[in-house]
Amino acid sequence: MMKTAKLLLHCPDRPGILAEVTDFITVNKGNIVYLDQYVDHVENIFFMRIEWELDCFLVPQEKIHDYFATLYAQKYAMEFRLYFSDYTPRMAIFVSKMSHCLYDLLARYSAGEWNVHVPLIISNHPDLEHVAKRFDIPFYLFPITKENKIEQEERELRLMEEYRVNFIVLARYMQVVSEQMIDAFPNRIINIHHSFLPAFVGAKPYHAAFERGVKIIGATSHYVTTHLDAGPIIEQDVVRITHKDTVQDLVNKGKDLEKIVLSRAVQKHIERKILTYKNKTVIFS
């Protein structure tokens, strides 16, 4: 496949931004293969994602970031990120005891659906080590208690630095991630949970939802912040429930929804289609 560069940016909206960015690419003989932009008129913020081929591009790949920062980012007060298609991101998966999301992620990974590498799986329980072995991925166990949480997360951070991990997926990891972990991976930790919060809290939300007679259940995937389950939302979906559904039906439908929603969020992250601004996301098509 043709090597490409992907540029995501946001800045205060003003005339000429789109023209100048596209001109930078075309003047330097880049062929634009994707362009999407959006203006938040309430905040007056311009968002853009653009991708172009590098085969004939006149600016060397290693200098594109500096060129763009000097010529445009300073002028327009832009925040931007630049990615290249020949780089494969490295994803760590954190799990506890539930396997449905882990199996779905690893099935897509093994099938080659995503341009990503999974160098390790980390868990606070030994239950899913056999899954890691089945997919031939190193499994690391870090039992966590209130007393050793800080020390264990420091060990996890050192391990992920050793493996050059770019982002983390919490595949039903039943631990609250600490601030030190979040600071090390800002907007790069993806979580999944059912969408009953805050109405049905506790260990058995589907049982509580069944007793209440809910007609819709959902799942939400989001970036992790220091505010519990309140980070920028990436993906959500729902499925309808009827009076004929048992508690186990709710649990099964919820698991199916969770793994689908999580995988969609991970795919968007891998494809560099997400821009975060404040506590919201702009998801490009």
Image (spheres, grey):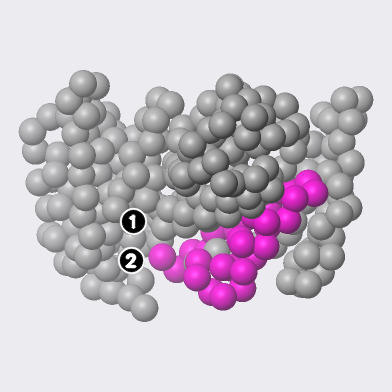
Does 32 sit above or below residue 36?
below
Amino acid residing under circle 1: Lys
Density class for disc 1 (Cα within 10 Å; few <14, some 14-19, many ≥20) is many
Instruction: Residue 54 in the image: state x and y as whole percent.
Output: 29, 68
Instruction: Residue 107 in the image: state x and y as whole percent.
Output: 62, 69
Quarter of the image for the N terminus: give it: bottom left
Q: Residue at x 56, y 31 (%)?
A: 213
Amino acid residing under circle 2: Thr
Residue 100 in the figure: left or right of residue 40? right
Which mark, by number, is residue 273? none
Residue 206 shows up from this direction: yes
Determine if the magenta segment contains residue 108. yes
The residue nearer to you, when weighing 244 against 28, is 244
Q: Which residue is mark 2?
A: 4
Q: Which residue is mark 1?
A: 6
Instruction: Residue 198 in the image: state x and y as whole percent.
Output: 58, 22
* Local secondary structure at mark 2: strand
Instruction: Residue 285 in the image: state x and y as whole percent.
Output: 29, 53
Q: Residue at x 22, y 65 (%)?
A: 33
Q: Residue at x 47, y 46 (%)?
A: 239
Residue 28 in the figure: left or right of residue 78? left
The residue nearer to you, when weighing 226 against 216, is 216
Q: CB atoms at circles 2 and 1 under 8 Å apart? A: yes
Does 46 sit above or below residue 139?
above
Q: Residue at x 12, y 53 (%)?
A: 23
Density class for disc 2 (Cα within 10 Å; few <14, some 14-19, many ≥20) is many
The residue nearer to you, when weighing 178 against 98, is 98
Residue 262 in the figure: left or right of residue 159? left
Residues drawn in magenta: 85-114
Q: Kindly report the distance in space between the C-alpha atoms of the residues bearing marks 2 and 1.
A: 7 Å
